[in-house]
Image: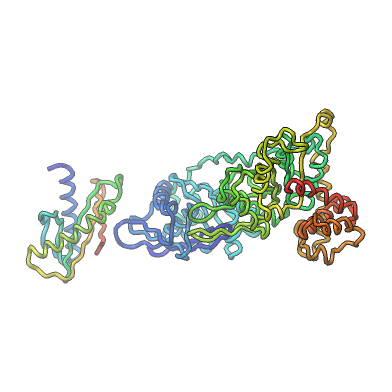
Amino acid sequence: MKAKDILGRRGEDLAAGYLELQGMRIVDRNWRCTEGEIDIVALDGDSLVVAEVKTRTSLYYGHPFEAVGVSKLARLHRLAAAWCRDHELRMPLRRVDVIAVVDDGVGDPVVEHLKGVG
Amino acid sequence: MGLGRAYSVALVGLNGYIVEVEADIGQTLPAFVILGLPDASLNEAKERIRSAAQNSGIPLSRRKITANLIPASLPKRGSGFDLAITMSVLRAANDIKSTERTVFISELGLDGRLRPVRGILPAVMAAVQAGYPDIVVAQANAAEAGLVPGARVRGYRTLARLAFDYGADPQELALDFEPEDEEPCDPEDAARPVPDMSDVSGQGDARRALEVAAAGAHHLLLTGPPGAGKTMLAERLPGLLPDLGDTEAMEVTAIHSLCSLPSASVQLVRRPPFENPHHSATSAAIIGGGSGLPRPGAASRAHRGVLFLDEAPEYERRVLDALRQPLESGELVIHRSAGTAAYPARFQLVLASNPCPCGKASGKGLDCTCTPMMRRRYVARMSGPLLDRVDIQLEVERVSLAEFGQSGGEEDTRTIAARVEAARNRQSERLLPFGMETNSQVPGRVLRGILRLPAPTTRILDHSLERGVLTARGYDRVLRLAWTLADLGERGSPDSNDIGQALALRQAATSAAA
């Protein structure tokens, strides 16, 4: 595994732990289809949450949130629908969350969570 | 987190409107949106503001920032809103305390310095009038903004300093950043020596005509061969005019503030401006115009001063005729897609023209190679209605060797200007009850009514009218000139001698146009 993949993996683990702390139930991780990958699928009460996790070691190249653009958001919404089809589930309440993890490897990692974007 | 508010000013022509800037920070992905009809340069404010805030040590929030400029329907342009938007966003993020009713007008540099903007004087005037006397501008604009009575102006060099004064955390701020003052780059502001009348040798008639034109604010046409000194004379007219009063100086400075970037040594323009456009100028250049919101042209820059059109027949006819409206009303109203702008344009018009296309048809005109038809067409390019508004129409001859040889000893500008000022004072005293200042403004109704002269005095004039040499409008113009001549001669009212001289001052053109 490359360094960036290890970092990403660690960020996703941190994010998943964070979501569970918020009272969500993780139902799937790193689900793939032809259109792309979902980092985390979770249930928040009745809502299906598709979470994208962005991890950085510093803010030198911009904040993790800034890396999520309009096209990526649109793809996440399509992936959420695809996940439901694949699992033959009807989830009328769906949303996309973005989680930013900044981990400089020295202090405690900082996790920020935006709910229901796009 | 929440809502922030700050104020700025949008200029439409010379009229300013208070603009309220609201900023909101939303809990979603990072973005920066400016609402309220921003133009391209205002939309670029986002990038300037982000960098400036970052480099000042107070980075903007990493969320969605929405800045709304109210009223939304008013088109806004330019970079002067940078600072107000920044302050409202910082307030929304709770980085600074409330700015209350302070108005912010400045552009931001990427390094966080405050940069001067155009039109600061009319903007500050509008803010004070609207009841917002507390104003923050770039240090380079502070002197100009301070000219407005009643304004409490504060000048800053950097955003960090300003944020510090509004309670931002000094730990993070880049307070040791001190940009150097920019060099004044406006060549127009370097005191241009006004040419002196003593340089003009001979030309007794023309010198006299210039003095009369200056004293009564009469429009002037000089016709004569190349090299006779028409341009030389016209350039010396502003020197003869008296200093501008307080209100006039404010008007003139406001227009110049719109046209040029500020320089370090800003003061009120006290001397009448002189505008000398080239004859290839378009009507947009003379009248004002441009895409979007119209900008002032040469006619407005010559407000309260002299607009000199050299080689007047070479101008496009459309351009010359467009000057008739401001000559009448003293104002130019220009309509464009982005709005309507009204600029003052009460200028003294000086036209210079060759007598014919080849320029040699003066005196006996023996060298002239033009056909009579060419000559007539050339003079007719200046339309009748335009020339009708020009009180003094004078033929200027080449200086003879005799006059040229004994040059020296001619009166200098100061001596003549003193006489002009005395004459102006007499006029304004007499014309005060009518709400006018100079003889050139007096309508015929008053000239032939309250200010009527006794019949023996006007006998030559009545005679000319009877013979058809003079039109009714021409009659009034001679009367106006006669009053100015009387003012210069310190007489209470014109005598028959003044009338005779006045008649002579416009006789030349009558023969040229015939």
Q: Is residue B172 above or below residue B94?
A: above
Nearer-the-camera pick, B100 or B198: B198
Nearer-the-camera pick, B8 or B399: B399
Nearer-the-camera pick, B251 or B503: B503
Q: In the picture provided, is B171 more to the left or to the right than B258?
A: left
| Quadrant of residue B494 within the rendered picture | bottom right
Q: In the picture provided, is B369 more to the left or to the right than B25?
A: right
- Colour setting: rainbow
Q: Position of residue B266 (x, y in %)?
A: 63, 46
Residue B271 visible to an observer of this rendering: yes
Residue located at (50% from left, 41% from top): B179
Residue located at (70% from left, 51% from top): B348
Q: Position of residue B127 (x, y in %)?
A: 57, 61
| Quadrant of residue B43 within the rendered picture | bottom left
Q: In the picture provided, is B50 more to the left or to the right than A89?
A: right
Q: Position of residue B438 (x, y in %)?
A: 77, 57
Nearer-the-camera pick, B374 or A77: B374
Quadrant where the image shows the C terminus of chain A: bottom left
